[in-house]
Image: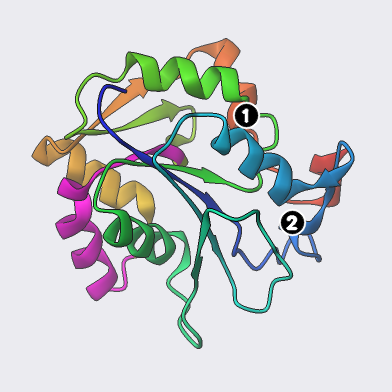
Amino acid sequence: MNAPFAVALLAGGRSTRMKQDKALLHWHGQDLWQAQLHKLQTLGAERVLLSCRREQPLFPDEGVEIVHDPENVDDGPLGAITRCLERVQMPLFVLAVDMPWMTAAFLREQLDQHENPEQGWFFRGPHGDEALAGMYVPAMLPHMREALSKKDLKLQHVIEACVHSGSAVTRQMEDDQAAFFHNVNTPGDLK
């Protein structure tokens, strides 16, 4: 990217299908949140954010900004991304903690290809838009806030509205890219 940008790791999910906190899963010698955060830290972002629940035992290095989910509010990833984007007020690349096969090299390649810092971008795969590994921009905030006010927490609806308004674009996912977006939702997925 030619413009300053920020990155955010989303680690605050409830992990109900996994039956344990996905952020704390063991992954190649460290907790999954640490592995994912390290990938984001290598991208050259101006700011690095970690979105999580207050009670999670996540202690990042100095320089990582923690954005806690508010108490007694269940607004899912949409709420977390909105809070992070409102804080940084610049393009924000978001990555979910449960996408361990995403690589820093692939992310750098995508960032290098993105030329318009005023426009968000997302990959469209066989199951729709991949909302938890994409670029959000301040121009998307009105759509995000409106969805939150209506309690429509589906990120794909927000992305569709942003694509329609021109504040975001989607790219068709190539077959060889699909593995990067695979989620770990159950113990079987991890194996």
| Residue at which label 1 appears | 102
Percent position (x, y) of residue 93? 41, 39
On the image, the x and y values in percent for residue 153 come to 37, 64
- In front here: 177 or 35? 35
- Please give left or right for residue 5 compared with residue 11 in the image: left
Query: Where does the C terminus fall, quadrant-wise?
Result: top right
Residue at 74% x, 56% y is: 22
Q: Tell me, yes or no, if residue 70 can be seen here.
A: yes
Q: Quadrant of residue 124?
A: top left
Q: Secondary structure at mark 1?
A: loop
Instruction: Inspect the image, locate mark 1, and give the three-letter code of the amino acid beneath it.
Output: Met
Asked if residue 172 shows in the view, the reply is no
> Residue under circle 2?
22
Residue 46 location, x and y as percent?
Answer: 39, 40
Residue at point 76% right, 63% down? 21
Left-right relation of 160 to 135: left
Q: Which residues are magenta?
A: 133-152
User: Residue drawn 34% across and 14% down?
Assistant: 113
**Distance CA(mark 1)–CA(mark 2):** 15 Å
Name the residue type under label 2. Lys
Query: In this rendering, would 174 be left or right of 78?
Result: right
Residue at point 59%, 64% (across, down): 12
The prevailing secondary structure element of the residues shown in magenta is: helix
| Residue ranking furthest to the bottom | 72
